[in-house]
Image (cartoon, grey):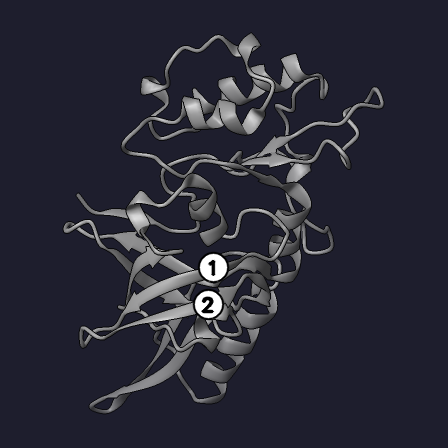
Amino acid sequence: MSVAVRTLLLIFPVLLASCSSYDAGDGASADTLFTQPGTNPVTQNTEFDIRQFPELPPSCELSDMRQWVDANMRDYYLFYDQVPLLNLASYNDLSALVTDLRVTPNDQFSYITDADQANAQFNNGIKFGFGQLVAVTENNEVRVTQVYPQSPFFSAGIKRGDYIEELNGVPILNAPENDILAFFGVGTDPVTMTFTVRDSTGNSRELSLTSTNFQIPTVMHRSEITNGAATVGYLMFDSFLETSRTELIDAFDAFDAAGINELI
């Protein structure tokens, strides 16, 4: 089985904790769902706020928050029809609730994260973590599918196609949940982790890296390809963020200046 773990959004919803900063209307605050489409358009002059979307819990009372988490896992989650029935009143920790609502073994990584952190990524292209996207191969190996420039992984020389064998001395697929979440940049506090990385030649090395904030480009690569008498533009576009506007304009201006009117 091959499962892509791309930004942690392909197989599960990411719940955003924002009770300290979002006013639900009665002085309380609320969370919102990362993948919820919403009805309010984001215009050119409007800063995106993940918390603007509907379907917020009525308050930040624990009972309302538990119901909200459970309802969203049964709506937006890929495995929504397999979510177990739990005694919600027995949970005082929303993270523990999400963990127990996850459908295993298909999903090990659903989590709650901070809304302000998500807004920083959407509005400013600032991401926290180590700077990697990964996929689990048919042989149950964790392969790096992308490395962001300026990230800790990039600075350490880890490349697309390398394999992550261990986290903190434990085989990555058996690593504790807290280590897995830290690996994917969950949280805001820097975490130092030890990685065992194997490159395409089979050589392994051990690296100690610390998670941090870094700028992510959305236009990952741009080039011109000549095929006979024709020259076409190649564009690798990663994700739609507020920063994408300028990056795409610059890329297409460059293509236009080169006389390119065909695009891959």
Which residue type carries mark 2? Answer: Ser
Give the residue drawn at x 38%, y 51%: 6
Report x, y in % for residue 176. 40, 42
- Compare marks 1 and 2 and give the one earlier in the sequence: 1
Pointer 1 local density, CA inside 10 Å: few below 14, some 14–19, many at least 20: some
Which residue type carries mark 1? Answer: Met
Give the residue drawn at x 56%, y 64%: 244
- Foreground: 36 or 63? 63
Does residue 234 appear to the left or right of 240 in the view shown?
Answer: left
Q: Is residue 60 visible?
A: yes
What is the residue that sits farthest to the bottom in this orientation?
229
Q: Which mark is residue 137?
A: none
Give the residue drawn at x 41%, y 29%: 77
Does residue 8 appear to the left or right of 50 in the view shown?
Answer: left
- Foreground: 241 or 179? 179
Q: Quadrant of the C terminus?
A: bottom left
Total labels: the figure holds 2
Pointer 2 residue: 208
What is the residue that sits farthest to the left in this orientation?
139
Does residue 22 appear to the left or right of 215 in the view shown?
Answer: right
Q: Is residue 218 visible?
A: no
Badges 1 and 2: C-beta atoms under 8 Å apart? yes
Secondary structure under the numbered disc 1 in the rendered image? strand
What is the residue that sits farthest to the front in this orientation?
169
Report x, y in % for residue 158. 37, 73
Report x, y in % for residue 9. 43, 43
Residue 226's quadrant in the figure?
bottom left
Position above or below: 163 against 14? below
Report x, y in % for residue 162. 28, 68
Does residue 81 appear to the left or right of 190 in the view shown?
Answer: left
Pointer 1 residue: 193
Position above or below: 70 against 121? above
